[in-house]
Image (cartoon, rainbow, N blue to C red):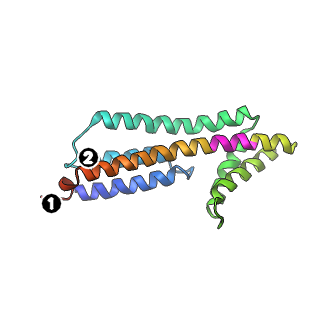
Amino acid sequence: MDIVLLILGFLCMLIGILGSFLPVLPGPPISWIGLLLLHSTKAVPDNWWFLGITLFFAVFITVMDYVIPAMGTKKFGGSKAGIWGSIIGLVIGLFLPIPGGIIIGAFLGAFVGELTQNTDQKSALKAAFGSFLGFLTGTFMKFLVTVIYAGLFIWKAIEYGVELFTFS
């Protein structure tokens, strides 16, 4: 059973890292579930402080992912259309066969979204930059947390590897 939990936990880590870029997947909470699954094995001792602190950061980063883009948009005079445009552009950018398609798509999406609200291209470009900057900040924070969680997962799996792979 420990092997199944280890594999499921590792899959949660991978999905969590993907979720830091994909807006439909909550990356940090999924990665935290991977840590929880690892600690649910018989080999890894329960550490409720570790799980509690990592849960706090997963929830905090997830909440901040909604707050930061709105702050960036507001600071640069943008609208919700810019935020939604950035998200839609990101999803479209996933399918572009060019390097940096996600980034280009997110920025162009924010710009087009702002153009629907602002007739002035200069203010739409400024607001799109704010939306895009907020989006990048949130994405970077989520990516950083999920990679740290993956590192912790691997470290714990290696530390208790003998116990995890002992069949009894």
Toward the left, the furthest residue is 168
Which residue type carries mark 1?
Answer: Phe
Q: Nearer the viewer, residue 155 or 37?
A: 155
- Judge from the rendering whether residue 35 lies leftward or rightward of residue 40; answer left or right: right
Whole-percent x, y for residue 147 in the image: 44, 49
Q: Earlier in the sequence, mark 2 or mark 1?
A: 2
Q: Position of residue 102 (x, y in %)?
A: 63, 56
What is the magenta segment's predominant secondary structure?
Answer: helix
Q: Which residues are magenta?
A: 128-135
Frontmost of labels 2 and 1 is 1
Q: Amino acid at mark 2?
A: Ser
Query: Tag 1, which secondary structure?
Result: loop
| Disc 2: which residue | 40
Residue 167 image label: 1
Tell whether 112 sits left or right of 100: right
* Rendering coords of residue 96 (x, y %): 66, 64
Mark 2 vs mark 1, CA separation in Å: 16 Å
Label 1 Cα crowd, 10 Å radius (few <14 / some 14-19 / many 20+): few
